[in-house]
Amino acid sequence: MAGKQNALPVISRAEVAKHNKPDDAWIIIDDKVYDVTKFASLHPGGEKLLLDTAGTDQTKDFFGLHRLDVLLKYGPKLIKGTVEGAKPVKVETWKDFSSVPYSEPSNVRKGFVSPYYTEKHTAFRKAVREILDRDVRAWANQAETSNEYPSLELFQKLGQSGIIAALTGRGHHLKYGPALPGGIKAEEYDIFMEGIVHEELGRLAAPGATDSLCAGMVISFPVTAEFGFKDETIFPRLAQEILSGNKRICLAVTEPFAGSDVANVRMTAVKSADGSHYILNGVKKWITGGFTADYFVTLARTGGSGAGGLSYFLVPRCEGLETKQITTAYSKSAGTSLVIYENVKVPAEYLIGGEENQGFVQAMQNFSKERWLICARMLSISRFTVAECWKWALQREVFGKPLITQPIIQFKLAEMSARLEAAQNWYENITYQMSRMTFIEQGTLLSGPIALLKYEITRIGSLIADQAPQIFGGRAITSSGMGITIERFCRASKFASILGGSEEVLSMQAVKLALKGFRTNARL
């Protein structure tokens, strides 16, 4: 592409000005000359609007109405040459490390260093970003509005590229999957790299579509990997199916009767007289990815009331299990569903961990990891949204000046950016602590700090959802064009404050856990 552009003819502005008629219309955008004569009839804003500008430089007006993606899509077919005297400028695309202020975590900013990330992490991020740009971004943007579910072929493609394996984190299970992106070996893979994959998915700014690809899997498959099965042949087979993208899996914990209050799950699992299987009955609700899942990691009651009577099961889609789509505020492509179990027969060996009534402890340990990945995704989509605000404030003109010259806009950008930077540093510190702990230790020692981190990040999300529309104005409520990212963020950002435990429950949990280590003889 670069070579082709270098060979383009050089055209003077005086020459462009001559092509100002309906049957011969050229315009300039970013020092490139485009012939829009035939395209004018296809112009979404009308033929006249485009032809009236023929022969002139329309850079300012173009970027006041259109995103760069529009130019990248149509420009190569219409380009005639470069403007005389133009200096070559590299146009940043989605897959590039952005130079927009605070649009990237500091470890990839020029001149910055990090105590946590190495060059290997940066190369890994670049590899993941290129895979998502090539295989996912176009589909995700389309699916966010078309509500289409990801195809099996897309899952298999992500399996082959190593993205699915990367999303499941470090551990023994990686030996059953394809090679990781960027040539990273399984023994080199760490939790910072795992966080990077979630951050890059967040940058797609298509929360419903990206949740359909991984949200259910990353909070369910690790339960099976960590706690396993009494029959040791089950997990290797499951891991190969999931990591290759040939099968899909989700977590089924929440019920109409029990959300953050996990101890009150009502679904029952009754063991047969001969001990060969369990019969499951009950309803699960708001299950992300459930509509298309092949497996359901299901929490059910095998014992008495309360936390001590729960167990996890791997439940294949089978007779008696029915899923129904739930319409939510974001894209239906997420596959959010109601899951109905009516006398579902599950082999006894599919009891996760091999021992009854361990499910609550397993769920609590898993929740810390789930909340951490929500933090990673939320931080990234928040940062990408704020970067959109920076770009728009610079290119939008009001009252004869760029919007960014207005003091109130500068304050909004400063407040959002400062809060994100603080949360990013806290997130990286928590991630480092996780890297030094086992899965069990994470669930025990970091449960409170991660709960507080999630609370803070979702509060920042609420701030951005409030301030970003004030910068974008009417475009922020339009589900296409310049404000598409803002509209999507505002519509879906509240999900993060509920999923994985609501803000209120997590704040109470964090305080209760902190009090356990509070000496009763402490005095002012």
Image (cartoon, helix red, strand yellow):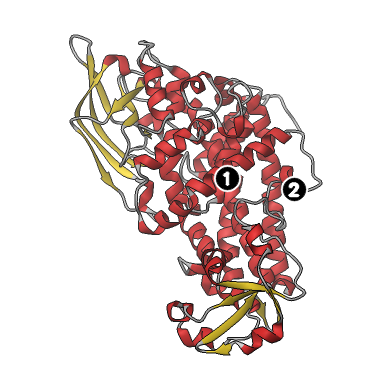
The spot of residue 447 in percent (x, y) is: 57, 30
- List x then y, in percent, for residue 11: 69, 78
The residue sitting at 43% across, 81% down in the picture is 41
| Residue 297 visible within the image | yes
Asked if residue 330 can be seen in this view, the reply is: no
On screen, residue 264 versus residue 225, left or right, reads: left
Quadrant hosting residue 124: top right
Q: Amino acid at mark 1?
A: Glu
- Rendered location of residue 43, percent (x, y): 46, 78
Residue 377's spot in the image, x, y percent?
55, 44
Residue depth check, mark 1 versus mark 2: number of the one nearer the observer: 1
Instruction: Inspect the image, locate mark 2, and give the three-letter code of the amino acid beneath it.
Output: Arg
Q: Which residue is mark 2?
A: 109
Report the residue at 44% width, 44% height from top. Answer: 211
Under circle 1, the secondary element is: helix
240 is higher (above) or lower (below) than 448? above
Label 1, label 2: how many angstroms apart (C-alpha)?
A: 18 Å
Front one among 321 and 384: 384
The residue singled out by tag 1 in the image is 130
Which of the labelled discs sits on residue 412, or is there none? none
